Image (cartoon, rainbow, N blue to C red):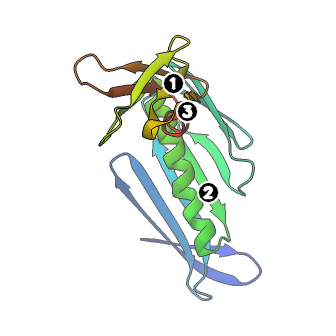
Amino acid sequence: MIAKVVWRRHCCVEMWGSGCYYGFHLALSCCVLCEKCCTDTYCRCFPEWTVKVSVKGRKVTVKGPRGTLSRDFGHLRLDVQLLENGTQLKTELWFGSRKSNACIRTVTSHIANMITGVTKGFLYKMRMVYAHFPIAVGVEDGGKKVAIRNFLGEKIVREVPMLEGVKVERSTDVKDEIVLSGNDINAVSQSG
């Protein structure tokens, strides 16, 4: 632990602690006299040779071999910045409450999912289960739409459009299974 004197409204001593856990760096600065957190910081390391991350304001853009994803975190009062020649992303919140401090890890998890999406992608497998009425599921418009027939014996054809960037196809080896794939985890999970 390193003690550092910081002058704000009151003269107080801050304790800075840091640790590394699987590519994540967490630093917490607490005011000793008033026992209230002044800042919470969370850093995320990422591979520079496959991914290029750019930050403008609170809008984060990630470019990789599978495409580009961007997300705007303007609704949160966080500081997002790149460190160490663009290989580390630092998310910082000043004078936050317990609930707002939870947003730090959420934002870095979203960015980590974006990095995974542009490097590996996401794949969801869904199976159709029925007891009496056999459900017929078909993929239409080249993987942009799913048509569900005979759902609970209905004559109506239910059509489920896929979100942008999501492709759906029938599984070749498993009966009554469809596979959703894409770069954005939010789009893939909400299309199912």
Q: Is residue 21 above or below residue 138?
A: below
> Which amino acid is tagged 1?
Ala
- Determine whether the residue tagged by mark 1 lies in a helix, strand or loop: strand
> Which amino acid is tagged 2?
Glu
The residue indicated by pointer 2 is 92
Alpha carbon separation for disc pair 2 and 1:
45 Å
Which residue ends up furthest to the bottom in the rendered image? 33
- Determine whether the residue tagged by mark 3 lies in a helix, strand or loop: loop
Q: Are marks 2 and 1 in contact (CB under 8 Å)?
A: no
Alpha carbon separation for disc pair 3 and 1:
44 Å
Lateral position of residue 65 relative to residue 98, left or right: left
Alpha carbon separation for disc pair 2 and 3:
16 Å
Counting from the top left corner in percent of width and height, residue 144 is at 55, 19
N-terminal of the pair, mark 2 or mark 3, is 3
Counting from the top left corner in percent of width and height, residue 138 is at 44, 20
Select label 2 or label 1 by which is in front. Answer: 1
